[in-house]
Image: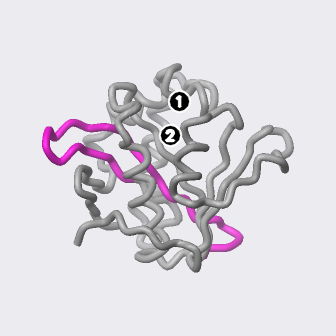
């Protein structure tokens, strides 16, 4: 897992020093409102330990990056790619931002770069995300990035909609080399 950057943002692999950030995001009701129920501190700490083990494997199926503002050094959130166990060429992605970074186009830029990284550097053929239909922010971002969106076939038991991008469809460039 490598670092990558956009014009404004830097994404670095999550590390042991990020426990406070990780737990703060997963225990925050505001951050979790469109994701699921907020975790207890104890559960978040256990999940963080599992996350570190999974990301540090020689051939991980989970990749997690911390998003940082390059100018201020402020930590803005985390994002991840999780390969499907049944098909390692496709993966689900997700993002969690600290509330102070909402409505600043951080999610658009970081998801754009994450999509590029997954499709071009991890050689995935498909990236997708499942989301609650009422999560208008992710819907707008998916539309701007030209993800194919399926709001009609809600996933069983979750009521989630989905969006996906195939490697053959992706044309944007966010990562600066």
Q: Position of residue 175 (x, y in %)?
A: 31, 66
Residue 27 shown left or right of residue 9 in the figure: right
Image quarter of residue 138: top right
Mark 1: give few (<14), some (14-19) or many (20+) Cα within 10 Å: some
| Span of residues in magenta | 65-89
Q: CA distance from mark 2 to mark 1?
A: 6 Å
Residue 17 drawn above or below residue 98: below
Residue positioned 67% across, 48% down in the render: 130
Q: Position of residue 37 (x, y in %)?
A: 62, 25
Residue positioned 61% across, 44% down in the render: 139
Residue 42 shown left or right of residue 169 in the figure: left
Given contact means CB atoms under 8 Å apart, are the residues at marks 2 and 1 in contact?
A: yes
- Residue 24 is one of the magenta-drawn residues: no
Which residue is identified by label 2? 47
Image quarter of residue 90: bottom right
Residue positioned 32% across, 31% down in the render: 20
Q: Quadrant of the C terminus?
A: bottom left
Which residue is identified by label 1? 43
Mark 2: give few (<14), some (14-19) or many (20+) Cα within 10 Å: some
Q: Position of residue 113 (x, y in %)?
A: 39, 60
Q: Position of residue 99 (x, y in %)?
A: 39, 26
Residue positioned 27% across, 63% down in the render: 3
Q: Quadrant of the N terminus?
A: bottom left
């Amino acid at each position: 897992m490598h670092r990558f950057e956009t014009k404004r943002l830097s994404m670095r692999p999550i590390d042991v020093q990020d426990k406070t950030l990780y737990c703060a995001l997963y225990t925050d009701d505001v951050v979790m409102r469109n994701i699921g129920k907020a975790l207890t501190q104890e559960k978040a700490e256990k999940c963080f330990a599992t996350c570190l083990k999974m990301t540090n494997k020689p051939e991980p199926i989970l990749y997690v990056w911390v998003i940082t503002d390059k100018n201020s050094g402020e930590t803005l959130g985390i994002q991840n790619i999780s390969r499907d166990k049944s098909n390692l060429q496709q993966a689900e992605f997700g993002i969690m931002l600290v509330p102070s970074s909402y409505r600043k186009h951080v999610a658009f830029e970081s998801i754009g770069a994450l999509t590029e990284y997954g499709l071009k550097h991890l050689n995935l053929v498909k990236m997708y995300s499942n989301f609650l239909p009422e999560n208008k922010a992710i819907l707008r971002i998916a539309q701007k990035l030209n993800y194919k969106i399926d709001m009609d076939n809600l996933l069983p038991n979750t009521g989630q909609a989905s969006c996906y991008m195939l490697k053959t469809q992706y044309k944007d460039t966010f990562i600066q080399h």
